[in-house]
């Protein structure tokens, strides 16, 4: 990786669109099902190359997921692309019944998830989606951290998996943290940094923040392990339990609800098998004030500084933030 | 009491049959399907007889004659598709599938028994001939639209039928799907609305009136066909119009009676999921025998 590449920031939608176009060229069964979202999904290139295979249902998310299920029943591989907030909430029953209960090979690409539409307000924030999707049987839930992981996960979901997959596609620009030869493996975390004192388990837009936090903590003599946990379901249980055993304390950090999603999954696991302190960083149980994605993440400590403060609190170090009462 | 009646495997009509013979085959099939369905629901203590009898003639017409689905072609990509969107009528579907040879007749007795494949609502993963998991209302039509688009993309002549309740049309997802079916020019799609005017708790008119259903469907770009849902000849004529020459999706308003043809069930709102007493089963069976 060149220095320029190392400093570059990427919109993961570009990786999504590029890999889908590549896969679409190789397999004519692949169709994109959009809800007036060709532009926001960055699927203009796909639409030009495969005009018959872009199915635009208009602004109708329940129909969008149902139509995709029918396309699957007709031998196609549908990739549903829709803003995460509307896909998860508006079409929840279709996702549960038509995709998951029916065990259909459908890829649900949740665009611009989390707080991506910061200033547009809580109507457009997709805070709950990972928590909701995680509790649906048969559903695989993936939150990629960078363009490399996004492309690899979409490739796996379309070409190798045979069931429903929910995958978040971030628009907030992120650096590439995974090696270019990275291969997505379901249920497998990637340890990007080792450490003995605690483990930060994270994914999506928070991963590079966690790496920055770990680097800063190292400067203060704190060894933070960083687990890149793109696959929230199935969770890499072994990696989590080993981390719990070897580092003694865990922090989860995600651009989603602090409870219910990745944090919920990790907490449930360690509570049952290896109880250790867990601190969950994420969106609190509230609707957001106006603010950009970055500002809201900072506000709620979904940031390098937030992770550093939480790590110190977890370890009982000086400078730790005041414990919440 | 446990009731036992036999259901022969009737199979599909054959090309050498006259129209009269086809109609007789389907009518007798529907009579035997209702008889079996009645006893299965009574024995299981669960089911939706009113809505099942409402569509039995439609199901029998489709599976015994119209649909290009046979035991040997159950997984043929070019088969016609039927999605039972009013999934609570599952027992009528299972019984019709068995009469058609698409499901083992002996398995019917397991309806809603522990670990049975025959759930109270259809599941495609359990029963090969089921095309979609349904139950919550308003799911079948969007799936059918997707199926029809897949056929359109394939340049295939296969047709997609979806059977919805009329109360079910109060779900907004149906109208999203109808609008899109029209937009896509899905002539290979046939919606059959079971127009019995009754939903679980009251008439559709007293709940959220669908009228004028024909005008609404027409305004959504459908080719509307009105038909008596209990007149097999009329059903054959209606289905023969699919795909419509106009290139539009077909919307068949199948005017039916919930609980038909049982005297004490017909048009009675109570029979959405009421269970018959033993005496009522005997009486209904006698009424069905009288139709033979």
Image (cartoon, coloured by chain):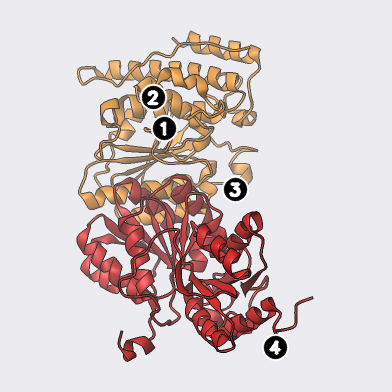
Chain colours: A red, B orange
At a point 56% along the width and 79% down the height, the residue shown is A223
Q: Position of residue A130 (x, y in %)?
A: 53, 63
Mark 3 to mark 2 CA distance (whole Å):
37 Å
Place residue A125 in its image quadrant.
Answer: bottom right
Q: Secondary structure at mark 4?
A: loop
Distance CA(mark 1)–CA(mark 2): 8 Å
Q: Position of residue B221 (x, y in %)?
A: 36, 53
Q: Considering only vertical position in the picture, is A42 above or below B256?
A: below
Is A266 or B262 nearer to us in this picture? Answer: A266
Whether tag 1 and tag 2 are in contact, CB under 8 A, the answer is yes
- Category of crowding for the residue at label 1, using alpha-carbon neighbours closer than 10 angstroms: few (below 14), some (14–19), many (at least 20): some
Q: Which residue is mark 1?
A: B127
Q: Are marks 3 and 2 on the same chain?
A: yes
* Residue that mark 4 sits on: A319
In the image, are marks 3 and 1 on the same chain?
yes
Residue A113 lies, with reference to residue B191, above or below; the image says below
> Are marks 4 and 1 in one subunit?
no
In terms of secondary structure, where does tag 3 sit?
Answer: helix
């Amino acid at each position: 990786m060149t220095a320029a590449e190392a400093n570059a920031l990427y919109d993961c939608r570009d990786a999504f669109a590029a890999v889908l176009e590549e896969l679409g060229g190789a397999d004519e069964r692949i169709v994109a099902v959009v809800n007036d979202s060709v532009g926001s999904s960055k699927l203009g290139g796909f639409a030009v190359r495969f005009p018959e295979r872009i199915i635009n249902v208009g602004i109708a998310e329940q129909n969008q997921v149902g139509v995709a299920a029918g396309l699957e029943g007709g031998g196609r591989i549908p990739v549903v692309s829709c803003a995460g907030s509307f896909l998860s909430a508006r079409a929840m029953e279709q996702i549960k019944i038509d995709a998951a209960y029916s065990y259909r090979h459908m890829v649900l690409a949740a665009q611009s998830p989390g707080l991506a539409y910061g200033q547009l307000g809580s109507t457009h924030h997709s805070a709950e989606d990972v928590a909701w999707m995680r509790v649906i049987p048969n559903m695989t839930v993936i939150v990629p951290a960078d363009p490399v992981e996004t492309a690899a996960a979409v490739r796996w979901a379309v070409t190798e998996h045979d069931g429903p997959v929910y995958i978040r596609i971030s628009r907030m620009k992120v650096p590439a943290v995974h090696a270019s030869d990275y291969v997505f493996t379901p249920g497998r975390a990637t340890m990007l940094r080792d450490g003995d004192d605690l483990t930060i388990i994270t994914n999506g837009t928070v991963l590079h923040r966690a790496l920055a936090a770990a680097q800063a903590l190292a400067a203060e003599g704190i060894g933070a392990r960083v687990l890149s946990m793109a696959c929230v379901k199935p969770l890499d249980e072994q990696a989590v339990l080993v981390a719990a055993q070897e580092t003694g304390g865990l922090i989860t950090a995600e651009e989603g609800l602090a409870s219910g999603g990745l944090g919920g999954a990790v907490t449930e696991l360690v509570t049952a098998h290896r109880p250790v302190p867990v601190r969950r960083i994420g969106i609190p149980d509230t609707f957001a004030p106006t603010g950009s994605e970055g500002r809201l993440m900072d506000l709620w400590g979904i940031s390098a500084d937030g992770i550093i403060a939480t790590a110190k609190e977890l370890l009982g170090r000086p400078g730790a933030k005041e414990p919440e009462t | 009491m446990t009731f036992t009646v036999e259901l022969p495997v009737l199979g599909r009509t054959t090309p050498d049959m006259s129209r009269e013979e086809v109609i007789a085959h389907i009518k007798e099939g529907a009579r035997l399907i209702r008889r079996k369905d009645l006893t299965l629901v009574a024995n299981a203590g669960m089911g939706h007889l009113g809505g099942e009898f409402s569509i039995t003639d439609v199901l029998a017409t489709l599976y015994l004659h119209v649909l290009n689905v046979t035991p040997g072609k159950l997984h043929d990509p070019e088969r016609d598709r039927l999605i039972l969107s009013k999934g609570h009528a599952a027992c009528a579907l299972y019984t019709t599938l068995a009469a058609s040879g698409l499901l083992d007749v002996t398995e019917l007795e397991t309806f809603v028994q522990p670990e049975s494949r025959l759930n109270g609502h259809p599941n495609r993963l359990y029963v090969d001939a089921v095309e979609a998991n349904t139950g919550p209302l308003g799911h079948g039509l969007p799936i059918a639209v997707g199926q029809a688009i897949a056929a359109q993309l394939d340049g295939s002549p296969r047709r997609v039928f979806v059977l919805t309740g009329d109360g079910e049309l109060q779900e907004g997802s149906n109208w999203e799907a109808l609008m899109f079916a029209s937009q896509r020019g899905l002539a290979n799609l046939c919606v059959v609305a079971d127009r019995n005017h009754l939903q679980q708790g009251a008439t559709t008119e007293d709940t959220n009136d669908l009228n004028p259903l024909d005008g609404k469907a027409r305004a959504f770009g459908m080719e509307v066909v009105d038909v008596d849902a209990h007149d097999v000849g009329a059903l054959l004529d209606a289905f023969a119009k699919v795909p419509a020459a106009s290139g539009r999706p077909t919307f068949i308003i199948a005017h039916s009676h919930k609980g038909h043809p049982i005297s004490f069930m017909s048009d009675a709102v109570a029979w959405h999921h009421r269970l018959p007493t033993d005496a009522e089963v005997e009486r209904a069976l006698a009424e069905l025998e009288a139709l033979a």
